[in-house]
Amino acid sequence: MTRIPFIAGNWKMFKTGPEAIEFINALKPLVKDARGREVALGAPATALQAAAEAARGSSILIGAQNIYFEKEGAYTGEISGAMVQATGASFVILGHSERRQFFGDTNEWVARKLAAALDAKLIPVVCLGESLAEREKGDAFKVLSAQLQGSLASLTPARAGTLILAYEPVWAIGTGKTATKEQAQEVHVFLRAETAKLLGEDIAQKTRILYGGSVKPDNAAALLNEPDIDGALVGGAALKPDSFAQIVNF
Ligand code: PEP
């Protein structure tokens, strides 16, 4: 089964609309020869429209970093899947560990947001990852299994065709500590097997599982050459066009 690598930047709370345009205009020529991979950028809500317009005509996909699960209503400060879709964006990151840690996103909420993303025809990128304490206790696989099951609870095989998972060990995000390629590959194999139990072998083989956690130009190729690592979710190294392009062109 060939799975096209999906290389996504996550800008977090960085970049205004004009900064997003500047970045994309600089990135385009650097990734124009990248074949056989998808290039994506997760932008802040305020920069989505500008980023989507700047990316138009290129193969760069733009996405949001979160949505709320209701379609509309009195939910001050929130944005819906349809609002994201209307900007020209095509994917959404869900359940990032920073959302889980600072904004109370639970597996149940991620599952509801996943259903809302699919209703709005957005590609969902569902993030999972264990903490350092959980890994050191030997609980990583148990935690990941529970997160996967809970976060995908709203999903049926018929709706799972565009699902993307991202394994992001919390201890590797923004810390400079990367999982080794062997550690990441082992978890990806596990997550694929767990996905097969939930959604069937066919969906599991098609689902791209990204690795995230201090991916940099100098470690990207080693990770991305592992058979079950189908792309990367990149934070810090996606803030500069040069370093992000080096990862895209791994
Ligand atoms: C992330 O934000 O998802 C991430 C993996 O960040 P970093 O690459 O900076 O560790």
Image (cartoon, rainbow, N blue to C red):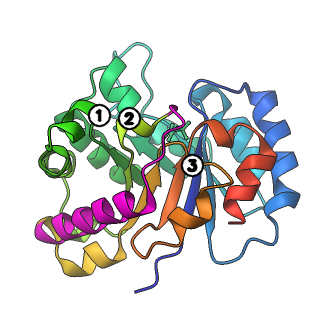
Please report the residue visible at 19 percent of the width from the left and 70 percent of the height from the top: 193
* Residue type at the position of mark 2: Trp
Please say if the residues under marks 1 and 2 sit with CB atoms less than 8 Å apart.
yes
Name above or below for residue 60 compared with residue 23. below
Please report the residue visible at 48 percent of the width from the left and 46 percent of the height from the top: 178
On the image, the x and y values in percent for residue 4 come to 53, 75
Residue 179 inside the magenta-drawn segment: yes
Instruction: Depth check: give the residue in front, 101 or 126.
Output: 101
Please report the residue visible at 52 percent of the width from the left and 46 percent of the height from the top: 85
Residue 50 inside the magenta-drawn segment: no
What residue is pinned by disc 2?
Answer: 171
Instruction: Depth check: give the residue in front, 105 or 182.
Output: 182
What residue is pinned by disc 1?
Answer: 132
On the image, the x and y values in percent for residue 79 come to 45, 28
Instruction: Depth check: give the residue in front, 180 or 59.
Output: 180
Identify the element where label 3 is drawn.
loop
Name above or below for residue 68 compared with residue 94. above
Crowd around label 1: few <14 · some 14–19 · many ≥20 (10 Å): some
Q: Kindly report the distance in space between the C-alpha atoms of the residues bearing marks 2 and 3.
A: 13 Å
**From where the camera sits, is residue 99 visible?**
yes
Sequence-first disc among 1 and 3: 1
Sequence-first disc among 1 and 2: 1
Identify the element where label 1 is drawn.
helix
Sequence-first disc among 2 and 3: 2
Tell me which segment is drawn in magenta. 174-197
On the image, the x and y values in percent for residue 248 come to 68, 61
What residue is pinned by disc 3?
Answer: 215
> What secondary structure is the magenta-colored segment mainly?
helix
Q: Kindly report the distance in space between the C-alpha atoms of the residues bearing marks 1 and 2.
A: 5 Å
